[in-house]
Image (cartoon, helix red, strand yellow):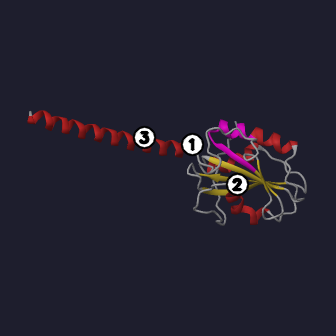
Amino acid sequence: MGSLDRVAIRLVKEAEIMSQEPVTSPESAVSLIRDVIQDMDRECMCVLNMKSSMQPINFEIASMGTINACLVAPRELMKSAILSNAANVIMLHNHPGGSLQPSQKDMNVTERLYHAYEMMGITLLDHIIVGNGKENIYSFQNHGELPLYDYDMERYKYHSLVAESQVRQNNAETLEREQTEIAERMIQYEINKKR
């Protein structure tokens, strides 16, 4: 019987370009990698991996294509997210010709990847097309093409952060109510004691 090879999968870090600031909009996501992909003469697909706090962990150029197409395999985009222990991802790709209009293939790939990431417990927050101008971007989320109901997409806030904030506020209100009730009981006790 033949032997079975043992393999190891490792994340290899390259030069840092990430920010400590959380990603708060499509524009802030693009600003992290625009210099890398904006002037490329062919399409490339990138994935920005983020913590649940929306702080970027890293990004990867997952695929390089031709002047007007890029082959995207879900497993290639998901590798770095899994190895990075990402909670959220944003896909970005460039259109060297400058057009921001997504193709039908862009729409189909986005839908497939949304569901693939979802099965892995990772949220695809957006797919952004970067044109060749400084302000030229197309956000699938801003155009209502990703069904993220649990997110405050105006600020790209992960719902658990909003939920934690709500719990803290509820706890503060409960504590205040309990302190008021204790104070009222103490006052009532003092009144009854004087009788």
Could you say whether the residue bearing mark 2 is in a helix, strand or loop? Answer: helix
For the residue pair 185 and 107, the one nearer the viewer reads as 185
Q: Residues within 10 Å of mark 3 (few under 14, many from 20)?
A: few
Which of the two marks, 3 or 1, is nearer to us in this view?
Answer: 3
Q: Of the residues shown, which amino acid type is indicated by label 1?
A: His
Give residue 89's mark.
Answer: none
The reply to whether the magenta stretch includes residue 45 is no
Q: Which residue is mark 2?
A: 26
State the quadrant of the N terminus: top right
Q: Which residue is mark 3?
A: 170
Place of residue 86 in the rendered image (x, y in percent of width and height, measured from the top left) = 61, 49
Q: Residue at x 13, y 33 (%)?
A: 192
Q: Residues within 10 Å of mark 2 (few under 14, many from 20)?
A: many
Residue contact between numbered discs 3 and 2, judged by CB atoms under 8 Å: no
Residue contact between numbered discs 2 and 1, judged by CB atoms under 8 Å: no
Q: Residue at x 33, y 39 (%)?
A: 177
Q: Is residue 102 left or right of residue 52?
A: right
Q: In whole angstroms, how far apart are the C-alphas of marks 2 and 1?
A: 17 Å
Give residue 159's mark.
Answer: 1
Q: Residue at x 90, y 59 (%)?
A: 97
Q: Of the residues shown, which amino acid type is indicated by label 3?
A: Asn
Q: Quadrant of residue 11?
A: bottom right
Q: In whole angstroms, how far apart are the C-alphas of marks 3 and 1?
A: 16 Å
Q: Which residues are magenta?
A: 113-127
Q: Of the residues shown, which amino acid type is indicated by label 2?
A: Pro
